[in-house]
Amino acid sequence: MISTSIFISAAISLVLLLLLTTSREDVEENAKGGSPGPGWRDSRDALQRPELVFRIFSREDREFILHMRSPRLQRIYQEERRKVALHWVQRTSREVSKIMRAHRLLSRESHNLDVGAEAKLFVQYLRLQLTCGLLVLLIKTFGPHALSDLAAHAGELYQRLGRALPDVVAANRIAASEDTATH
Amino acid sequence: MSDLGKLVTMSNAYDDLLRRTLSGIQCDLARLIYLASTRDYNSGMYHHEGLAARYGPESARVALRAAHKDIFYRLVALSLEELVTELDTYVRISREAPTGLIHAWQELEPYRVAVPMEVDSTMVQLFLSNIRLALEVLRFRQEQSRAYPSASSLLPLLGL
């Protein structure tokens, strides 16, 4: 129980640290004079392109590289995709922060704020930032295909468990019947 | 000229560019490089003599910029395998020695200047990354064909 809470608090601390790093990068970028002109339009374009995300995390590309059977190519591929995936996640996080900051400034001037809607929006924002933080952590630690790999691993474990379960049930039944016979 | 008139002229310039110039170029990567070459390095402005003479400099610029972006988006949307094929076609039509071209592209990264302005930065990252990977794949294939010359002649038959 104690080890679980230590693990959870460590994970939360890591995510918070990553969020802090992302927001600091954001501040630095603004300080450099990131113009809200074309960049603003650019960011909206990016958020409207789910096919871009599909391309970055494409299994097809990964299989193509695996098919080459070259450890060097696989290593380069992992490194290249990791960089692009991190760029996308961190940028998404920064853009959402910008949107929220703009919204906060507008809200300050508003006289009839819907507290419920604002709270809901804030929770959604936190969830998105948390997801981005977790994604950064996963991509940095396990690579760009971490989530699909974990899902595949879970599926494999599930199948193994499924195969092992009837044997265990049968063994238990035999043990139980032997117990009854001896008593 | 009215706004509608300007739009029609720009649209005609774009169609003309696709029909007369770009259709004669064999692959999208070569089209992208051609369009980037019509852009001034210092000002970022596009220029094409023929188009400007027929439709005016402004319509020609808009047409070139739009075509440049469209082809870039098409290339970004390609799978890695398709991009390798695209790069392979480009190497073949360039009439340069493949080894030399791949080496020069890996060293100098000239494809960086082929990226249009004001496009999504993640798309740019993905495009540059995919070109680097495609170059590595071509280099790997060349090394394989040098190491196993007889086996490599069978690769096209196997669809590889």
Image: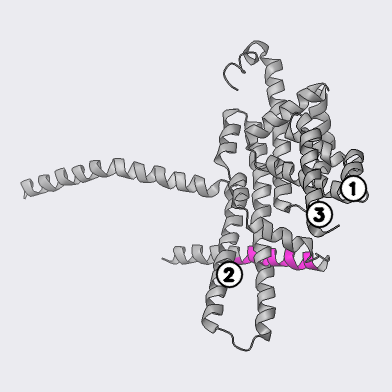
Q: Type of residue at label 3?
A: Gly
Start and end of the magenta stretch? A16-30
- The residue tagged 1 is B56
Asked whether, in this view, residue A20 is left or right of residue B108, the answer is left
* Closer-to-camera residue (B36/B18): B18
Image check: A75 left or right of A166?
right
Q: Position of residue B127 (x, y in %)?
A: 72, 43
Observer-side mark, 3 or 1, equals 3
- Circle 3 residue: B5
Instruction: Label 3, secondary structure: give it.
Output: helix
Indicate the secondary structure of the residue bearing disc 2.
Answer: helix
Task: Name the disc covering residue A125, or none.
Answer: 2
Q: Chain of mark 2?
A: A
Is B14 covered by the magenta stretch? no
In the image, is residue A103 above or below residue B128? below
Q: Report whether mark 3 lies on the same chain as mark 2.
A: no
Give x and y (percent) for residue A120: 52, 75
